[in-house]
Amino acid sequence: MEKFDDEPGGNWIEGFALDDPTLADSILGLWQAAARVASAADDEQPTPRDLRTATALLQEASEWVVTALEGGDRTSTPRMLVEISQAQGAVREYGNRARTQALARVHSGLGRLRGLGTVEELMELGPTELCRCGFDRAMISRIDGSHVIPQVMHIPEDPDWAYDLQQVISGLRIELGPAVAETDMLRRPGPMLMAHALDDDRMAASMLEATETRSYVAAPIMPEGTVIGFLHADCLLSRRTLDEFDRDLIGTFAQGFSSAWERAVLIERLRTLRQDVRRVHSSVLAVMDDFSEAAVEIELHDPGDQSVVSSAAALPVSGAIRLERLLTRRELDVMHLMAAGETNAQIASALVVSEGTVKSHVKHILRKLRAKNRAEAVSRFVTLSRRDNAA
């Protein structure tokens, strides 16, 4: 699947784009004026489309003007040198402002992610927030043993391509080895820059073919200090070669994302624990209610029958205790099937549970009905059912 084709000769920008036409025209004009002063060849017309190119053009123009001054030219060169210096300051200010805005987007995105309560939501929205930080595409992958497996791909400008691409990458298993760049992030956890992926032998061939990436950055996802996966991002659609700032940017994002991941896992665990405690609490209260409301009887029990003596759930079988108070809903389901003559295996199949779970339910039913076997339990169940229906 080929979605992206390079234009002849390439048309890529380096680092931050220079989106200020006025500043770009000023830089180009200064460079052209300096080239005329130095009598430099002007066969190829440069275009300051990014900060790196703009900085290089101004540096070259400055060197030409200095050479002209040293050669005795005192006409326009001093004023040009001042204008070049001012333009260099403007470029630095533009770059600082762009970096500050990018970092602000990172912190805003992480703030939104920290409000999520599930890992599933983080998987879905994490790449979205990463793209808002200045990237065209973002991907989450997980580590499975010695392999990296891509999970989620997000391309905000082309959702259809993102869907098609995810179908392709979801079947990839990239083996982590000495020749794969991502292995370094396991040895020394930290962000990584692959500025020129096509020329780097550490780039996994299967991933390169699937994603068509030319330049990308990556960072480990490591909640609790353990690397469990990676974030990847590039700027393929805007044809931008990534640089060290992009590497540090995704590194900062990954740190916050890892913390949000750890928080989401803890919230999910607490939610599960709370549900379990509530279930146990409800069961204990039901047993206590049944025990406290049971009718008083004069009855001798076999001293050797420890299940009767020691179990608070071993209640007297009396019409005063209704079945729904004595047995749980699931135990009633099992009891009905037992009364119909079903085996444990058949009951497990009917209720879509394991046979071991059914055995556990049967054991509880026998104890609660104070029955020695299944037949006696069915008999007492039928008796209680009749009393309940007559009540």
Image (tube, helix red, strand yellow):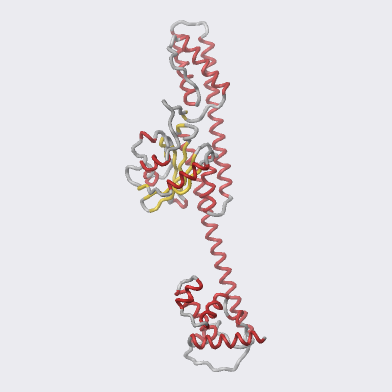
The correct choice, above or below, for 251 with respect to 56 in the image is: below
The correct choice, above or below, for 239 with respect to 176 in the image is: above
- Quadrant where the N terminus is found in the figure: top left
**Viewer-proximal residue, 124 or 271?**
124
The correct choice, above or below, for 301 with respect to 199 in the image is: below
Residue at 50% x, 6% y is 74
Q: Is residue 254 visible?
A: no
**Viewer-proximal residue, 348 or 38?**
348
The correct choice, above or below, for 340 with respect to 280 in the image is: below
Q: Residue furthest right?
A: 391
x and y, in percent, of residue 78 in the image: 52, 10
x and y, in percent, of residue 108 in the image: 58, 42
x and y, in percent, of residue 122 in the image: 53, 50
Q: Is residue 212 visible?
A: yes
Residue at 44% x, 46% y is 230
Hey, which quadrant is residue 332 in on the image? bottom right
| Side (left or right) of 98 relative to 225 | right
| Side (left or right) of 320 relative to 5 | right
Hey, which quadrant is residue 298 in on the image? bottom right
- Quadrant where the C terminus is found in the figure: bottom right
Residue at 52% x, 21% y is 88
**Viewer-proximal residue, 263 or 17?**
17
Residue at 51% x, 14% y is 81
Hey, which quadrant is residue 178 in on the image? top left
x and y, in percent, of residue 198 in the image: 37, 34
**Viewer-proximal residue, 345 or 47?**
345
Q: How many labels were placed on the picture?
A: 0
